[in-house]
Amino acid sequence: MTPRERVHRAIRFRSPDRVPILFFNKDQDQSDIVLVDVVRHFMGEKKDRSEWGFDWERRDETMGQPKTVLVEDWNALDTMRLPDPSDEHRFDGLDAARALYGDGTYYCASLVLTGFTVMSALRGFSASLEDLCMEPDKMERLADVVFGFEKAVIARAAEKGFDGVAFFDDWGTQETLIISPDQWRTFFKPRYKDQFDCAHARGLDVYFHCCGYIEEIIPDLIEIGVDMLNLSQPNLYDMEALGARFRGRVCFVCPISYQTTSITGTRADIFREAERLIGNLRAANGGFIGYVEEYHSIGMSPGNYQACIDAFRSCGGEKTLHR
């Protein structure tokens, strides 16, 4: 079974031979899914400039925060230079990836940062939250610009031979959504649906990454077409309850918790968490993808990184799944 077929079977609940694994930032030659960036959010020698025009400020090796607010005055939206979605060079990475990893891999066009995350980078996070309540018409204009650009890139990505498209938009705090579920459903849900429909109409699967606790909107994300749901902080959830509600309805993509187990846990702890994730979130015929990211920047040891790989391979391996 090729990696591409394995991922397709996991997403569609058609009994892959084992749990696929996504390697995010290291060892992609071992990954069933390879994410290829098609939006340039980390340009330049120091990877500190977005093609949207803002710069990143960093104190460590993590992504950082936007240094400047480009839409401090709403008039700036009329004169701001926008990225060109039709720039053919934004897809050059796919040919390079195919040369490295072959035709049998599942390739996902990564939009890198999307939706509200980009909006809040351009307008400022606090101002964006205020404007959703006080200046919704102006936020509508900003959303049209950002979501419209992304939709145009999605349409072009489909022409290039990608298997899926990846969205990255963080909606959760440690305990709840950053805005009310009703506000999210009114303002953002229709826009996501439009993007996801665009992807599906062109044969692309939808991968949606979200940090934080977002259980209130998981039914909405499933309803509007998310195929792979990347919950990056599984430690925030009641795993048994989450599986009881959603197992078999969406393909979960989860790491060993980056806030807890993969950083401070033992090898045995990591294996137990892998067993718990797969046991609760994977249906009998698929619906789970392991996620591995090298995170020394927040304290992950080389041993724990390797343990995460070993745990998903062991707990999600063919002999374990079918015994």
Image: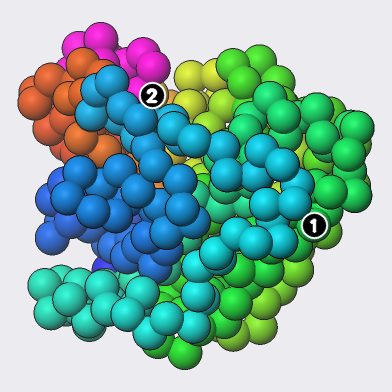
Residue 184: x, y in percent? 81, 40
Between 135 and 277, the one lying in front of the other is 135
**10 vs 156, nearest the viewer:** 156
| Whether residue 87 can be seen here | yes
Q: In the structure shown, which secondary structural element does the residue marked by tag 2 occupy? A: loop
Residue segment shown in magenta: 258-270
Residue 205 relative to residue 71: left or right: left
Query: Is 82 covered by the magenta stretch?
Result: no
Question: In the rendering, which numbered label is found on residue 141?
Answer: 1
Asked if residue 304 is positioned above or below residue 154 in the image, the reply reads above
User: Which one is nearer the viewer's eye here, 18 or 72?
Assistant: 72
Q: Which residue is mark 2?
A: 257
Q: Residue at x 90, y 49 (%)?
A: 137
Q: Is residue 247 visible?
A: no
Q: Residues within 10 Å of mark 1 (few under 14, many from 20)?
A: few
Lateral position of residue 245 relative to residue 27, left or right: right
- Residue drawn at 25 percent across, 47 percent down: 47
Query: What kind of secondary structure does the magenta stretch mostly adopt?
Result: helix
Q: Position of residue 192 (x, y in %)?
A: 72, 59
Percent position of residue 271, x then y: 26, 25
Q: Is residue 91 above or below residue 271?
A: below
Name the residue type under label 2: Ser
Tag 1: residue type?
Arg
Toward which corner of the image does residue 169 lie, by quadrant?
top right
Where is the N terminus found, in terms of image quarters? bottom left
Q: Quadrant of residue 15?
A: bottom left
Q: Residue at 38% x, 24% y: name it.
A: 257
- The secondary structure type at the circle numbered 1 is helix
Expressed as whole percent of the image width and height from the top left, the position of residue 196 reads 67, 67
